[in-house]
């Protein structure tokens, strides 16, 4: 700022750059520090400072390696909106999760874009036989339809939430209370050492918990942007799950703390 009170050229450039960065993240959902530095011809340090300023205004949310849309601005996003975000990371997580399944097992798979990646990876496991998948996700059931009769699909029933194509209470947990599975793969909006596993809405959190409690192995599948985040509805404590499958973008300090609580952490590529 000059003595006359008019922003100098450098201040103006920074303000314009930050506005463009915020617009880009709102449009794409995520941007990496390195990509932004190349795009605007500035250092990574400058970009991180820009992102910190934008986060302070509530316009973006910092994650390891970059920034995503602010959850305060986002609210709960429709399934289709989230599907393209961190697509490679979700595919890698899905492939690792599917590799854990053997023929004859029963899998509980809840709704979400990462669990959809698990379903797609299971579809590619053509050697599997006599696998049963229990799901409250209509899109998950449709993904696995092509795998019949190798994979049998049981849809939980309940009340439809169109935003996520999910089935919830009332009547959402009635069948789950009578079933037991080999492994549950559950998505979330946040996983934190202190707050545990959390979700943005209560109805789906109830289904997630019921699925976890019905299985011997309890696995959370979540891309790195969810690690260290806390949302409205608690699903369970870290001590109630066996494994977190995430990606290398997850904050290593947070994953170390989660592992110290007895939860095995896999950051897959």
Image (cartoon, rainbow, N blue to C red):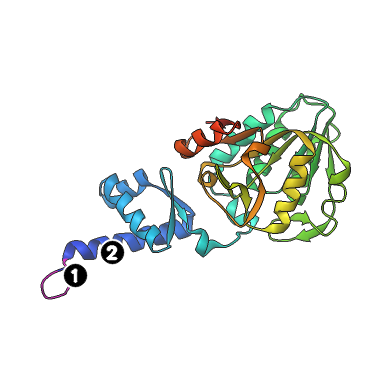
In the image, residue 117 sits, relative to residue 3, either above or below, namely above
Q: Circle 2 sits in a helix, a strand or a loop, which is it?
A: helix
The disc placed on residue 16 is: none
Q: Which residues are magenta?
A: 2-8
Q: CA distance from mark 2 to mark 1?
A: 10 Å
| Comes first in the chain, label 2 or label 1 | 1
In the image, residue 252 sits, relative to residue 9, either above or below, namely above
Whether residue 174 sits left or right of residue 29 in the image: it is: right
Neighbours of disc 1 within 10 Å: few (<14), some (14-19), many (20+): few
Where does residue 212 sit, x and y in percent of width and height?
74, 41
* Chief secondary structure of the magenta portion: loop
Question: Extreme bottom residue here?
Answer: 4
The disc placed on residue 15 is: 2
Which residue is nearer to you in this view: 232 or 32? Answer: 232
- Asked whether the beta carbons under mark 2 and mark 1 sit within 8 Å of each other, the answer is yes
Whether residue 256 sits left or right of residue 217 in the image: it is: left
Where does residue 65 sit, x and y in percent of width and height?
41, 43
Whether residue 250 sits left or right of residue 142 in the image: it is: left
Residue at 69% over, 58% down: 202
> Split into 4 quadrants, where in the image is the N terminus?
bottom left
Whether residue 223 sits left or right of residue 162 in the image: it is: left
Residue at 67% over, 27% down: 99
Residue at 69% over, 56% down: 164
Where does residue 257 sit, x and y in percent of width and height?
51, 36
Where does residue 150 sit, x and y in percent of width and height?
83, 31
Neighbours of disc 2 within 10 Å: few (<14), some (14-19), many (20+): some
Q: Is residue 5 magenta?
A: yes
In the image, residue 83 sits, relative to residue 201, either above or below, namely above
Label 1, on which residue? Answer: 7
Which residue is nearer to you in this view: 13 or 220? Answer: 220
């Amino acid at each position: 700022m000059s003595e006359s009170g008019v922003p100098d050229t450098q201040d103006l450039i920074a303000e314009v750059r930050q506005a463009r960065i915020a617009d880009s993240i709102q449009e794409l959902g995520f941007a990496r520090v390195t990509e932004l530095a190349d795009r605007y011809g500035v250092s990574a340090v400058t970009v991180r400072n820009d992102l910190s300023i934008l986060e302070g205004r509530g316009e973006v949310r910092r994650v390891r390696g970059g920034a995503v849309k602010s959850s305060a601005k986002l609210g709960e996003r429709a399934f289709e909106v989230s599907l393209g975000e961190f697509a490679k990371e979700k595919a890698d997580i899905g492939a690792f999760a599917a590799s854990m399944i053997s023929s004859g097992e029963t899998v509980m798979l809840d709704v979400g874009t990462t669990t959809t990646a698990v379903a797609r990876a299971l579809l590619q496991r053509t050697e599997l036989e006599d696998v049963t998948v229990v799901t409250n996700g209509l899109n998950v059931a449709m993904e696995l339809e092509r795998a019949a009769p190798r994979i049998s699909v049981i849809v939980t029933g309940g009340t439809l939430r169109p935003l996520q194509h999910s089935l919830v209470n009332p009547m959402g947990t009635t069948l789950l209370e009578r079933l037991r599975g080999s492994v549950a793969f559950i998505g979330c909006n946040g996983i934190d050492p202190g707050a545990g596993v959390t979700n943005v809405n209560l109805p789906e959190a109830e289904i997630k918990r019921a699925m976890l409690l019905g299985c011997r192995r309890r696995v959370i599948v979540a891309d790195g942007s969810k690690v260290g985040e806390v949302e409205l509805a608690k699903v369970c404590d870290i001590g109630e799950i066996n494994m977190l499958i995430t990606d290398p973008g997850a904050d290593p300090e947070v994953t170390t703390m989660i592992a110290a609580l007895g939860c095995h952490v896999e950051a897959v590529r």
